Image: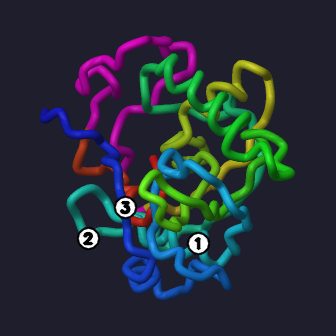
Amino acid sequence: MTDEKLNPKFEIELSCLEDKIHRKINGDFKDYNKIVSSRDIVNLHEVSFLTEGVLTDLIQNIPLRNSSHLPYRNSKIEVYRSEPKSYTIGQSFIDSRKILSLMGNLENNLLNSFFCKGISQLLPLKLYGINKNGEKVISLLIPPIIEHHDEKGVLIDGMHRSYICNCSGSSINGVHIYDIDAPLPFSPINWKHVKMVDIKPPKEERYKELKIEFFRDLGSVGIDG
């Protein structure tokens, strides 16, 4: 397996993403023409909610990796709170550096000027700000994504946020997806099998029975998985 990231860094022209989902994402904000990761925003200007329609269209247009197949095209999508311990996971490790970065950058710096009540209560958001090049950009901040297979929830994205809430005994808002037209890209495991590490393990050790062809390409619709 190559050393490329399973979810590579992305930068998407807003017009291209709007054409893909056949819906406008931006509201009345002018000159915000790129979708980037929230980690690329160095100065946050505005925060607004994603509408249910935009979120649904984003999720339903997520393809499988290197494929045109859309596993969520006919899925039912809901946003609600649940306890992380109630669902299984795929990733076998927690990156201690990412935990510290997440708690520091998201809680204390990026959103501290807005009335946001922490990662457990965040709803789907649009972040408007400036990147390091001084460009006006938008980031889509989506709660953890949980697929439901045979009535059992499986975490697809949002491992570190879920881990923080699981450790604190808190529930967390999530995007819950039902009726998925693709198998899982890994064999699910329980939280007790997760290890905290300082260095990411080799890719073949990050998931149990990884089938990379079934990996969901979240970045193609601007979700920073």
Magenta-drawn stretch, dominant element (helix, strand or loop): loop
**Residue contact at pointers 3 and 1, CB within 8 angstroms:** no
Q: Earlier in the sequence, mark 3 or mark 1?
A: 3
Element type at marker 1? helix
The residue that mark 1 highlights is 56
Query: How far apart are the alpha carbons under marks 2 and 1?
Result: 18 Å
User: Residue at horizontal 37%, vertical 80%?
Assistant: 16
- Front residue (pair 87, 128): 128
**Quarter the N terminus occupies:** top left
* Residue 123 locus on image (x, y percent): 73, 56
Task: Give the mark, 3 or 2, whose residue is nearer the N terminus.
Answer: 3
From the viewer's perspective, is residue 36 above or below residue 48? above
Which of the numbered marks, if any, corresponds to residue 11?
A: 3
Of mark 2 and mark 1, the one earlier in the sequence is: 1
- Look at 67% across and 44% down and name the residue there: 110
Mark 1 surroundings within 10 Å by alpha-carbon count, few (fewer than 14), some (14 through 19), many (20 or more):
many
Q: SS of the residue at dot 3?
A: strand
Which kind of residue does numbered mark 3 sit on? Glu
Q: Where is residue 93 in the image (x, y as percent from the top left)?
A: 44, 20
Q: How many labels does the image show?
A: 3
Q: Say left or right for 141 vs 196.
A: right
Residue at figure coordinates x 35%, y 36% from the top left: 186
Q: Give the range drawn in magenta.
A: 181-210
In this rendering, position of residue 11 left or right of residue 174: left
Corner quadrant of residue 51: bottom right
Helix, strand or loop under label 2: loop
Q: How far is disc 3 from disc 2 in space, using C-alphas? A: 20 Å
